[in-house]
């Protein structure tokens, strides 16, 4: 995974140019790509959802029609996929090709480096949308109104960013479809107001789906900026990154998976991997931060914790840690699809109905993701088996077929549900180490003991 979710497909038989692209390690890492020397080869890549091809660069030298027939064939299957035409010898091309009369995104002449392509990709991915252009919506303020509940997403009140004015129209939910609008976009935003709602037990503020996407963009920018500043403490950076992740997780839960959201998820994972690695390098105590940060949103917390465990267990490459992270972010997608308000951490107090939902959620989540497509096989497996264990006394939950990624997510999940969401205490940690941790393979057990600073001999 690079700066976006998925891969670039380059269809070209100009070996000199392909070698030039391959030599640009850093760019290829940021914009992962596949190479096909023939259209037949390319068609194979396009057929496999796991590659999740997002953009194609097609060379005119690939067929007798200078790429036009190939474009038709691609568009018949994937009408929205951007296709750029590449010509290494513009002087040999018919004028209709050079005038781009066949519907390519653009015709690129004589590219010499990969950066010509990546520049186009960046322009394509750059959304014109801004996070700060919401207008006051038409509903009246401070009176009870009826809204369609599915069109509004909860954001944590305590995390609400205190900018001088509100960039969004903000609501409080009173009942299933009953809301009160408390702020218009553009209204001054006073901390007293937020505090008074907090004191009255309000935990979430609601934003419309359309504005929530802008809110995520805003969170992404804020956490990205804070990560590069030296004078911001790690705990604040971690808070910002987790808040960004929590909003992506909420958006995935409430309004489903989309390419744009996966791009945001990818940015969140880049930020969390960067932060985890930096903390490890500085030898900062992870336990201290886990203890000091409130990780309220389950999926973002599990994703971040999975990254920490993956790194500790010896997964060095950013790509592998990000795969673990995305699987973790999506691990309970089946649960929330069955019941958006489900709280896995209240496991012990489940009703019969909730137990039934819980029993189905791994399988259901796997099915949802497989239907959506575009993920690595190991991600599906992790979602389908995150409550299965390698060891332990419960035969219904034991399997020798649990891979490392699944184990990491299972461990991060339990760590959050059982230990962190109920506040760390030495007693709870020790209990967790003595019972739950024994159900995992040895490397996972050791890694978590180290993170939690428990002496193995103890
Ligand atoms: Fe789960
Ligand atoms: Fe979970």
Image (cartoon, helix red, strand yellow):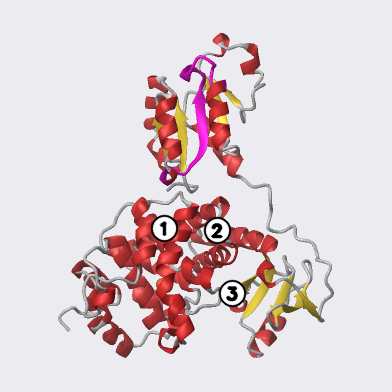
Residue at 80% in and 66% down: 137
Instruction: Compare marks 1 and 3 and give the one earlier in the sequence.
Output: 3
Q: Secondary structure at mark 1?
A: helix
Q: Nearer the viewer, residue 252 or 185?
A: 252
Q: Nearer the viewer, residue 306 or 228?
A: 306
Could one spot residue 9 in this view of the protein? yes
Residue at 66% in and 90% down: 200
Name, please, the residue furthest toward the top.
92
Check if mark 1's residue and mark 3's residue have beta carbons within 8 Å.
Answer: no
Q: Quadrant of residue 331?
A: bottom left
Q: Which residue is mark 1?
A: 274
Residue 19, how many percent across, how many down?
A: 37, 26
Vertical comparison of 125 with 221: above or below? above
Q: Nearer the viewer, residue 426 or 182?
A: 182
Q: Secondary structure at mark 2?
A: helix
Residue at 43% in and 81% down: 355
**Quadrant location of the C terminus?**
bottom left
Q: Which residues are magenta?
A: 50-68
Instruction: Compare marks 2 and 1 and give the one earlier in the sequence.
Output: 2
| Residue 54 is inside the magenta segment | yes
In space, the residues marked 3 and 2 are separated at their CA atoms by 17 Å
Q: Secondary structure at mark 3?
A: helix
Q: Which residue is mark 3?
A: 159
Please tell me how crowded label 1 is: few (under 14), some (14-19), or many (20+) other residues with Cα within 10 Å: some
Instruction: Compare marks 3 and 2 and give the one earlier in the sequence.
Output: 3
């Amino acid at each position: 995974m690079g700066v976006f979710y998925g891969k670039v497909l380059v269809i070209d038989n100009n070996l000199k140019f392909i070698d030039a692209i391959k030599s640009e390690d850093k760019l290829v890492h940021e914009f992962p790509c596949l190479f096909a020397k023939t259209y037949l080869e390319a068609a194979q890549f396009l057929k496999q959802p796991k590659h999740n091809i997002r953009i194609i660069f097609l060379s005119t030298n690939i067929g007798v029609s200078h790429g036009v027939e190939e474009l038709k064939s691609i568009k018949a299957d994937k009408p929205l996929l951007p296709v750029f035409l590449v010509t290494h010898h513009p002087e040999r091309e018919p004028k209709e090709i050079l005038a781009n009369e066949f519907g390519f995104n653009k015709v690129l002449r004589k590219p010499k480096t990969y950066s010509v392509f990546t520049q186009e990709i960046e322009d394509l991915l750059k959304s014109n949308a801004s996070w700060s252009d919401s207008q006051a919506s038409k509903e009246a303020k401070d009176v009870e109104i009826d809204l369609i509940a599915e069109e509004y997403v909860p954001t944590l009140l305590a995390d609400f960013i205190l900018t001088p004015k509100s960039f969004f129209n903000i609501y409080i939910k009173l009942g299933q479809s009953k809301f009160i609008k408390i702020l218009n976009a553009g209204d001054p935003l006073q901390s007293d107001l937020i505090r008074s709602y907090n004191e009255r037990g309000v935990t979430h503020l609601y934003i419309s789906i359309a504005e929530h996407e802008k809110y995520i963009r805003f969170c992404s920018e804020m956490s990205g900026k804070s990560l590069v500043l030296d004078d911001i403490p790690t705990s604040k950076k971690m808070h910002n990154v987790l808040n960004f992740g929590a909003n992506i997780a909420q958006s995935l839960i409430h309004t489903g998976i989309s390419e744009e959201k996966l791009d945001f998820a990818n940015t969140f994972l880049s930020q969390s991997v960067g932060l985890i690695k930096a903390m490890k390098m500085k030898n900062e105590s992870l336990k201290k931060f886990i203890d000091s940060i409130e990780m309220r949103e389950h999926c973002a917390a599990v994703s971040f914790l999975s990254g920490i465990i993956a790194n500790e267990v010896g997964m060095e490459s950013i790509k592998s840690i990000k795969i673990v992270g995305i699987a973790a972010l999506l691990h309970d997608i089946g649960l929330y699809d069955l019941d958006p308000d489900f709280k896995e951490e209240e496991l012990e107090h489940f009703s019969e109905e909730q137990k039934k939902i819980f029993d189905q959620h791994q399988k259901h989540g796997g099915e949802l993701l497989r239907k959506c497509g575009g993920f690595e096989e190991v991600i599906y497996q992790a979602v389908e088996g995150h409550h299965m264990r390698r060891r332990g006394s419960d035969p219904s939950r034991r399997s020798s077929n649990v891979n490392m990624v699944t184990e990491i997510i299972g461990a991060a999940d339990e760590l959050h549900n059982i230990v962190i969401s109920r506040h760390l205490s030495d007693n709870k940690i020790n209990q967790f180490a003595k019972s739950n941790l024994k159900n995992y393979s040895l490397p996972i057990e050791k890694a978590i003991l180290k993170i939690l600073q428990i002496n193995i001999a103890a």
